[in-house]
Amino acid sequence: MNPPLQEPTVFLVDDDDAVRRSLDLLISTYGLHVESFASAERFLEGWHKESVGCLVLDIRMAGLSGLALQELLKNRGIEVPIVFITGHGDIAACRRAFQHGAVDFLTKPVDEHSLMQAIRKGIAQDIERHQSHAETSDLRTRLTLLSDRELQVLEGMLKGQPNKLIARDIGLSTRTVESHRSRLYVKLKADSLAHLIRQMVRIEDDAVAAGILQAAEQAG
């Protein structure tokens, strides 16, 4: 079972003190936990990879701008949904923000309904991302628990081979292959071959999974 996620947090970054305090109060009234920062640099100091939530980010700030922070986070492999707010919005900035995965782009004064809708969307995306990563990590761990024989049977299954052909290729009886196949489903928590294939595709960047999938693809 995967560990429970942290309480979602709205990270609010705006160098305008009045705007930051106002938005902090507004978001808090909806029962959401808010952490406010006066600069992108301070946000980077306070954020950690286990955080769950979204970032409400002013696009123009002294020092590191909102767009520059978005690019920096992307380069560092930090995935956090971003809702941009600005009093100086333009088409080019909006396009650039969306190209890099922004949830929304809102102009000041920010409409309360639009802001909360965007924040909820961002939080939902981040929760789904964290859950997906946890499930993938768990699957990779379970994959390493397979024996060499079970990996051979799995490779045959992914090629679409029937049990008899798998048995012939690896020098086992059909009954033994059936036994390995049953254990595979249990160990990988899969209830069908289709489910098993979907699981493997999710972790195709994993070295073990990639090798198995490549072998299956080469077999046609």
Image (spheres, rainbow, N blue to C red):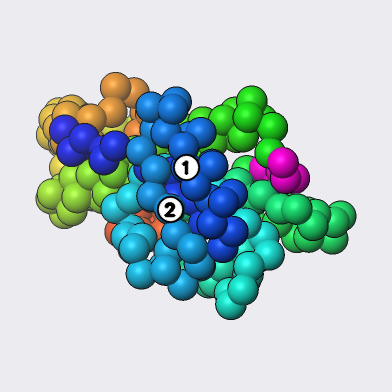
Q: Secondary structure at mark 1?
A: helix
Answer left or right for 42 relative to 72.
left
Query: 76 or 92: nearer the eye?
Result: 92
Q: Position of residue 78 (x, y in %)?
A: 45, 62
Query: Residues in magenta?
Result: 104-109
Disc 2 target residue: 36
- Other-residue count near label 1 (Cα within 10 Å), few / some / many at <14 / 14–19 / ≥20: many
Q: Which amino acid type is marked by label 1?
A: Asp
In primary-sequence order, the first of circles 1 and 2 is 1
Using the image, determine if residue 205 lies above or below residue 191. below
Q: Which residue is mark 1?
A: 24
Q: Is residue 144 visible?
A: yes
Q: Residue furthest right?
A: 91
Q: Quadrant location of residue 132?
A: top left
Separation (CA) of disc 1 from disc 2: 7 Å
Tag 2: Cα neighbours inside 10 Å, few (<14), some, or many (≥20)? Answer: many
- The reply, left or right, for residue 157 in relation to residue 148 is right
Which amino acid lies under the numbered mark 2 shown in the image of this protein?
Answer: Ser
The residue depicted at 21 percent of the width and 35 percent of the height is: 4
**Residue at the spot 71% in from the left edge and 53% down from the top edge:** 86
- Counting from the top left corner in percent of width and height, residue 216 is at 44, 50
Instruction: Confirm whether the magenta stretch covers residue 127.
Output: no
User: Magenta region, mostly helix, strand or loop?
Assistant: strand
Report x, y in % for residue 112.
63, 29
